[in-house]
Image: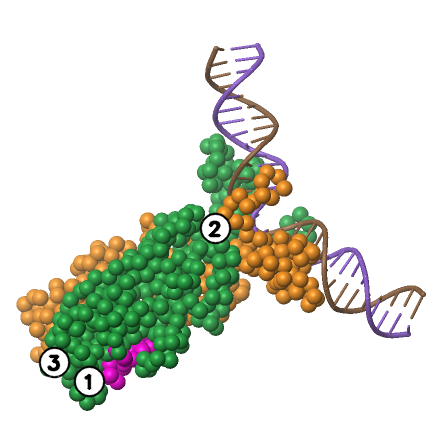
Chain colours: A green, B orange, C brown, D purple
Amino acid sequence: MNRDRAASGDRTEARPTLAAVASRAGVSPSTASLAFSGHGPVSDDTRAKVLAAAAELGYGGPDPLAQSLRRGRSGIIGALIPARIGVSFRDPVLIQTLDGLAEEISAIGAGLLLIPDVSDGQLSVKDAPVDAVVLVGCNVDTISTLDLLRRRNIPMVQIEGEEDAAVHTIGVDNRGGVRLLAEHLRELGHTRAAIITLPIDRDSTPGPLTAEREAAATVRATLERIAGARSVFPGIGGRIASGSRSDAGREAALVLLDVPPADRPTAILAQSDLLAAGVLAAAEELGLRVPEDLSVVGFDGIRVEGLERSLTTVWQPSQGKGAAAGRAIVEMLAGGSPEPVTFDVRFQPGDTTGPAPS
Amino acid sequence: MNRDRAASGDRTEARPTLAAVASRAGVSPSTASLAFSGHGPVSDDTRAKVLAAAAELGYGGPDPLAQSLRRGRSGIIGALIPARIGVSFRDPVLIQTLDGLAEEISAIGAGLLLIPDVSDGQLSVKDAPVDAVVLVGCNVDTISTLDLLRRRNIPMVQIEGEEDAAVHTIGVDNRGGVRLLAEHLRELGHTRAAIITLPIDRDSTPGPLTAEREAAATVRATLERIAGARSVFPGIGGRIASGSRSDAGREAALVLLDVPPADRPTAILAQSDLLAAGVLAAAEELGLRVPEDLSVVGFDGIRVEGLERSLTTVWQPSQGKGAAAGRAIVEMLAGGSPEPVTFDVRFQPGDTTGPAPS
DNA sequence: ACGTCGGCTCGAATCGATTCGGCTTCTTTT
DNA sequence: AAAAGAAGCCGAATCGATTCGAGCCGACGT
């Protein structure tokens, strides 16, 4: 009543509040609230009055913001993705993961807020009204933000990350998966193998896989996959690609393959199917037959658009990882403390591997 | 002090509030707030005290929920997408659009909340704490929800939708774009052309393009593109695909092409590049040469993964559409009322069209 | 030495809804 | 018919922070 709030046609409009509806209906705000939410005993008569008043005033239902504050929940789960949308979403694995995640959290009516993990990004996890955060495919060097969240008691789940971080982790058997592939190649007689890795640190510049960069690596999954390869081909080297894209794979493969035949690897372990697709393209450009001259394996087990060959690879449950993360979130929000999950992968033979050329 | 709130170690934890920090620092809540936000004149001394107290208490900064309520803004823009994430995000056009959108709204530090427009979805636009909503590639038959939002004064922008809806609309010249392609085909001598459309209504079942379905159509963009084709090939018919995916295009094309040569269309207008890619695949399966036996055009001008041919198509600024939507949102949130935008498209010749076979 | 001007801090209202205990009425039970 | 019970409604506190006007105190000007 003080100042001009009553005459608040001064702004563009004055959204009616629940209180306004209540007073118009001649009931108390509490009753109006009950009538709307259906949480308490309200006579049909009263409810009708409230609804009528709401209609007359053009009331659009309780303000989600106020509800959120009161409830202490916003119904929003933040998804920290590694890069801006246009880039991140070119990765089918990421999409499947988010899909599984979204599906699972929709059980509690929550939605997914995309938060690109780019430093200059204006939106930061820390001032977003999220109930929980999922780090999907991020390298957790954003520790500072993370313990801010922890301090706020916001549940966090990461998919494929450092185990030691005090964050619930969902992973797959990266090491074992790649070892399966490597063993497969060794059984075929390959001895000169090379690897094309996914980004290994925050600045994902492509280049040779050097000891220095490996030492400074922050992306756990990539390291694990390298380790898997090393467990079979101890000294294996290769190149780091700039991302899970076929053009990046092609680029890396061209460098690895465009050498004298004697030095050329007879097998390439690509750390993703998209990379592998790029390797196949490079091989074709160089006139190398797959698998006669070169064997190629991938990782992920996705269907690569436009690739008619069936890739030898390991399948990982991308969607399952997202779903597991979602379930973990749901459980944590309910007060539980779920067990970390590590998924197994499945060897998936294709026609891109064959006996090593003699 | 009543009941056991004071002893609220009863819950899992009791997040310290700004008030707690203030009292520990020996200042008033208002001062503490000022110290944190840096909005008012606070002595360095006091600020330090407050910050120290916050650190001791493990205070993680102001609760975004409370801030949102107070400010009346959540910093979240809702993006209504046509299907669940895994499906929607297979469409590169959608992704680019979202990318442009996200980029633009990050200017005001807002984030994107994904809201799948599926009826059974638990999360609904109406109880999400969003400052604005973008309908991207949705058919607006969700009118009921929409005027709920309007009533709440939530700015809305739609990308490619009914003009008549009282919603700010961003579009492209669908009609003109397809006409360019159709004219191109006519100049090449084609007379028997068929069209493969994107979904035309909510239940996106594939099937022949019949008058009935066309009459019941709800997807504006699809209709406009059909109209563009009709302006050159008046009686053109074809099939409705189930989505912008190459397998859907292939499926539709197989039906259209697997007929006696005399009836077979010599040109197919696919309403998206992905559909066109599917058409190319189908043609190859049927032993038809492109462009000698069949000309194919698409729409969108995207780079189709795994497609080495260069498609004759029109390019549309998908990202630009998203960015325009983002700018519109920003302007509307600032109180302005932006002008609706319609983008032009650009003919992009490729090698998938040629003279009609004699 | 007194009035005034700034700089800093505090009180209190506010954002919009939810919820719990208590109070009134009306109905049922013995 | 009195006691007990139930149904329906209201008051007031609460969620956690922001913000505006007012107040206090030291410093400066004359």
Where on the picture, by quarter, is residue B268? bottom left
**Disc 3 chain ID:** A
In which quadrant will I find the N terminus of chain B? top right
Q: Amino acid at mark 1?
A: Arg
Q: Amino acid at mark 3?
A: Pro
Contact (Cβ within 8 Å) of mark 1 with mark 3: no
Do the residues marked 1 and 3 share a common chain? yes
Image x and y of residue A358, in percent:
10, 82
Q: Identify whether B329 is placed above or below A21.
A: below
**Disc 1 chain ID:** A
Residue A357 circle label: 3
**Does B28 lie within the magenta span?**
no
Q: Secondary structure at mark 3?
A: loop
- Residue at x-position 40% and y-position 76%: A216
Residue A264 circle label: 1
Q: Amino acid at mark 2?
A: Arg
Image x and y of residue B132, in percent:
46, 60
Residue A115 visible at all: yes
Mark 1 surroundings: few (<14), some (14-19) or many (≥20) residues within 10 A: some
Residue interval drawn in magenta? A236-257
Mark 2 surroundings: few (<14), some (14-19) or many (≥20) residues within 10 A: some
- Residue at x-position 39% and y-position 65%: A162
Residue B70 circle label: none
Image x and y of residue B326, in percent:
44, 67
Where on the picture, by quarter, is residue B159? bottom left
Please name whichever residue, B319 or A96, is drawn nearer the observer in this view of the structure: A96
Please name whichever residue, B72 or A21, is drawn nearer the observer in this view of the structure: B72
Q: Secondary structure at mark 1?
A: loop
Q: Secondary structure at mark 2?
A: loop
Residue A73 circle label: 2
